[in-house]
Image: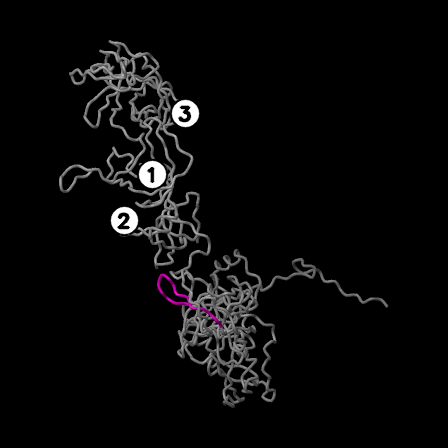
Amino acid sequence: MSYDRRTGKPVAVGVVKVDPLMVSAEIINDEKVQGTIVQEAKLVKQKNGTVPGTQDGLGRVTYVHNGECFFLPYGLDDVVGNSTSPKTGDDVLFQIATDKRDGKIRARNVESLESATQRYVGVVCSMKDTFGFIERADIVKEIFFHYSEFKGDISELILGDDVSFGIQIRNNKEVAVEIERLPDGTVIFEDIAVEMVKGKILKMIKSTNRRPSEALAGRIMYETPKGLIEIPFGEKDQRGECTLQQGDTVEFQIATDRRDKLQRATNIALLEETFDYSGEIRETGVIAALKDGYGFIYCADRDARMFFHFSEFMDLTYSPRMNDELQFTVDQDASEPSRQVATRIKHLTKGSVSFINILPSVYIGTIDKEPSTHKNQGKNKEGEPGNIIYDYEGAIQQIPYYLKDVKDQNSLPHFGDKVDFQIGELKATSKKQAVKVHVVLRNIAGRCHGFIATLKENYGFIETADHEKEVFFHFSSFTGDTNDLELGDEVEYTVARKTTKVSAENIRKLNKGTIPPDEIFREKGTLQGRIIRPMRIVNTEQEEYCGLVQAMDDDGNDMDEPYPYGITSLADKRDFLQKDDVVRFQVARTKKDGALRAINIGALRKFIRAKVDSVKGQFGFINYEAEEGKKLFFHISEVHDSAVIQPGDEVEFVLVQNQRNGKYSACSLRKITDTRRPERLLSRLKSITEDNSSYKVIIVRNPRGPDTSKGFQARTLWKPPIS
């Protein structure tokens, strides 16, 4: 209802046709009142088709309220129950109805108090300390009950139980008595239609502003053969908890209350066709993380991770899994306005979501840098990208690419390979990268040969086949078990630039002799000399990889020019040659350019013997003081033949000094003894004090006879055989 702006008269607006059963001119109070019949209602006899003027056939019932006596009319059609119409003086129960148009009141649902002992049914809807309430199935009303009225153990009665009960008037109020529990499903409040109806939401429920009296505050408009009809719905009538908005197209079922015949919409579900004409912006992404009841989505259209709750899935049967593809709407979080959340989520088939727009043009380029093969644990979980150089309109351009963007994962491109590719533009950041990378021409010249020069914990260096330099490699780039690698092993590899430095990739071990050895220059024979520059392995601060050895004559004078040498030049690949070490060597001529270099270099050193003091994992200490007060350090990798070293073992080693920090260590360790003294003997020896004032006899080895018995046997003279 509104008002005419000119005349101020009330006018009807927003007129919608509704079901006649939903319209009533009266408001009936749910509470029953007790009264007495003072005039019986009678059937009015018509005469000649007319009704006498003063005879309306209505009876009168009286009741007292707040000390005042009221007389209310009622008719025969207002009498309920199976008994006959109540007589004058009978006590009755009735409800008071008020006409909304003129305010007149009358009695409705008049029932004799004697027949009011009938049984009613309902559902327990509230339970307090000693009392509760039952929602009645005959009228839309709750009725009070005390726990003492329950026939049985009250501890077994729970919310939602179906019960039957009688009604009594106590203190002018109805209360439930003689309560009995019924089997579940006995009490039915409403009938739900089987067919699904399609409609549009006219009004949503705002829980913050809703008054308690507005239990069905939502409204849906749907079309019938009689025209458009508006139907209410409540908070619990939605199927699931997906966010609904005004104007959404939904499907629902119609529930009709058996008590008052009012209808409402229930099992309301959002339909996908809503998004076809609503203009709502829908985004896509994949599930990045799942928690207990919520998760996060990698967005395809924005550089962010979007929070979502499981309740926002439109399909209630869907169970979310990692990397599933989704379509959703971004909305403000009601509980935290500064945060955005994904709502109205739909599960998509695999391959529906694209994070990148691929341009149609195909380009040709060269691999300048290979991507990282092992993923890091940082923010960029795809690892470091590779790099492609290509020519675009006469200018040299470069573009990154990832391993996942290679078409054939069994044929990855390597440094120097020619590839074709397309350019993809990320939707979230507009950054460009190469996609659909395919090898066109392999860089055959990129296969290199070399020798293992250094092995550390998870990396090493390769000496090139021409012995001029060394190349870094990571163990992850080796095809096979790195435990099988030894110094001097021949390998094949490709050169790649994954960082600012060149490294070896795709390393494969070769059979010994695959790389032709340098030819020994026999005329020189075996020479003696001294190291004037070690290899860079020994002194990492020098720029040159190769070491230099100076040949000397018998008088110690220098001969010829110094000869370069590398890891393959050492007779013992573990030998730690330092500056000024005296060596013997031969001379060979290289295949590449015929240059002379030193080979079969062996150090002329004095080996020292001492006992191992302790072993701690990959290193240990020897009872030898190269520096005052300090035991001599050694690394397990310096032990020959992979012998097991234990405290007390006697070893033979060479003493070396680090060129950078000046500290001493032992290298080229060889185990001498296989057995140790028992601990009881070692502790006994420690307890013996040495007395230098007298001579001592020490048994070095106890005697043992030929038959392994202790001591000497009686001598038996040899008797020559008789011929």
Which is more toward the observer, 601 or 288?
288
What amino acid does circle 3 point to? Thr
Label ID, residue 186: 3
Say which quadrant the C terminus sits in: bottom right
In the image, taking residue 347 as reference, residue 75 lies left or right, namely left
Q: Nearer the viewer, mark 2 or mark 1?
A: 1
Which residue shows up at 51% across the image and 64% down it?
409
User: Which residue was labeled with disc 2?
Assistant: 336
**Secondary element at tag 3:** loop
Q: Nearer the viewer, mark 3 or mark 1?
A: 1
Which residue shows up at 38% across the image and 63% down it?
426
Q: Position of residue 545 (x, y in %)?
A: 47, 79
Q: Earlier in the sequence, mark 3 or mark 1?
A: 3
Which is more toward the observer, 99 or 639?
99
Label ID, residue 32: none
- Give the magenta range: 419-433
Q: Position of residue 323 (x, y in %)?
A: 44, 54
What amino acid does circle 1 point to? Gly
User: Which residue was labeled with disc 1?
Assistant: 227
Q: Position of residue 310 (x, y in %)?
A: 38, 46
**Secondary element at tag 2:** loop
Residue 620 in view (yes/no) = no
Q: Nearer the viewer, mark 3 or mark 2?
A: 3
Q: Position of residue 173 (x, y in %)?
A: 25, 19
In the image, taking residue 366 as reference, residue 711 lies left or right, namely right
Is residue 424 located in the magenta-colored stretch of the structure? yes
- What is the spatial separation of the Cα atoms under label 2 and label 1, in whole angstroms? 42 Å
The residue carrying pointer 2 sits among few (fewer than 14), some (14 to 19) or many (20 or more) residues within 10 Å by Cα, namely: few
Say which quadrant the N terminus sits in: top left
